[in-house]
Amino acid sequence: MKSSRLLIGGVLAATVALAGCSSGGGEAAAPEQTDSGGPITVWVDPPRVPAAEAFKEAHPDIEIEITQIDGTVGGQTVRQAFANFDEAGEGWPDAIFFPTNDDIAWATSSISNYAADLSELMPDVVEGYDEAVLSFCDIDGTIRCLRNDAAPDVLWYDTKFFAENGYEAPTTWEGYAELAVTIAEEHPGKISGMLGDAYAVNRYLQAANCPTNERVSETEARIDLEADGCGKMIDLLAKMQEAGALSNQGIFDGDAAEAGQNMVMSPGAVWWGNYLYRDTWGVPEGTITATTPLAWEGDSEPTTGNEGGGLWGLSSHITGAQLENAITFMEFVATDPAWQVELSTGLPGYGPVQDAWLENVEEDGYFADIEGSQAAFKESLGAVAPYDYMMYDTGSVWTQTVPPTLIDGGSIEDAIAAFGEELTNQAESVGYTVTH
């Protein structure tokens, strides 16, 4: 019954229609739950393969088949495969790490209904999460996934560069933009942010409470780039872009290492520290540090975005021993220190193991200000602006519109206008009624 090898190599043999919202017809009949009595099948992206392998080592009594899937943020391979499974009524993995957080929208739609409600299946684990951290998995009052790691944005900056030039880390978005322009003018080639990746929309527009994908219902979305929050962030981005303070590259670009080493300041997720600065860009130890997320002038509390954080889903189509073993897997990858503390590069989403992970940060000694970084990580958890994952992939629309427009010489305003138009088009194409 399992079709776990369909995605090896990232290629599907057939082109399938994507599962959309159920605005045009009734709900698909739910298939009966099954218990194969055999191994559980889990799908994971490359960075989560160690999590599955750690489970395999910790639970040798549970037979498991691990399939590595395409981990490209915004990729459609997994979604297409699930459309096939939904049509056939079989083939789903028992558990999955969704490569794109927006995947939870189609995985919980009335057409697919793949992701099980974990509120009753795993109540103790659910209770271990901070409500704000797990809010992305709350679909109409039911918890349909578990966060792998919390990924709130903090402000990263190069402490050596700042000290050498007498700069102080900003505390507001307006101060960040002003300093970014100053740095670009005084140190050409030094940048204070990147715009070319799918997470840039979270880094900037989410942090401004800009409604790019506000879920009104399963069939209605609010997209309003004319809202006040959008306008004030767009103005700041325009000033920085015109001054040469921002790069059109994305954080995951193959040639982004040089840009990363020249990025002396930027909002960015907690996992940037280990995964990007240390492991990907090779920024030397004791150079960068994190500080409190930025606030808007006049606001006492910071407001920040959230970049990824990863969602684990459990199949709603299994029962018996198969379900029990899959739940054991879900509990391990979400809560067990063997993965979340010892191997994960990001701050765990599960609250009870966060302090142990932060202790590892101290032992690693990578950041210039370890205590300050630890405090910033903790404070950022409650500063994330609300954000809904939708059937359309906001990050993909961003990368398809904003960087190309800027590279062709367009302004930030031109780029955001193209982004908003295409975002509305894609939302409507998958069945949403768009309101403003």
Image (cartoon, helix red, strand yellow):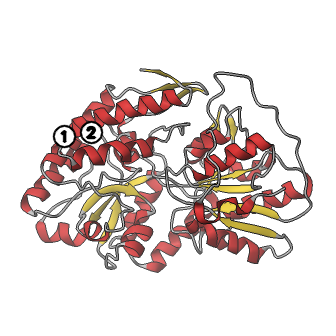
Which secondary structure, mark 1?
Answer: loop
Position above or below: 21 against 323: above
Q: Residue at x 69, y 74 (%)?
A: 54
Q: Can residue 220 be seen in the rendering of this structure?
A: yes
Q: Position of residue 312 (x, y in %)?
A: 65, 54
Q: Residue at x 84, y 55 (%)?
A: 1
Position above or below: 249 against 57: above
- Which residue, given by chain and number where applicable, does mark 2 sit on? 415
User: Viewed as shown, does residue 120 lie left or right of 138?
Assistant: right
User: Viewed as shown, does residue 72 lie left or right of 140?
Assistant: left
Q: Quadrant of the C terminus?
A: top left
- Which residue, given by chain and number where applicable, does mark 1 sit on? 411
Q: Residue at x 36, y 67 (%)?
A: 254
Task: Report the amino acid beneath label 2.
Answer: Ala
User: Viewed as shown, does residue 406 lie left or right of 4?
Assistant: left
Q: Are marks 2 and 1 in contact (CB under 8 Å)?
A: yes
Q: On residue 182, which mark appears?
A: none
Mark 1 is surrounded, within 10 Å at the Cα level, by few (under 14), some (14 to 19) or many (20 or more) other residues, namely some
Instruction: State how far apart marks 2 and 1 are (Cα).
Output: 6 Å
Q: Position of residue 128 (x, y in %)?
A: 67, 53
Q: Residue at x 40, y 45 (%)?
A: 202
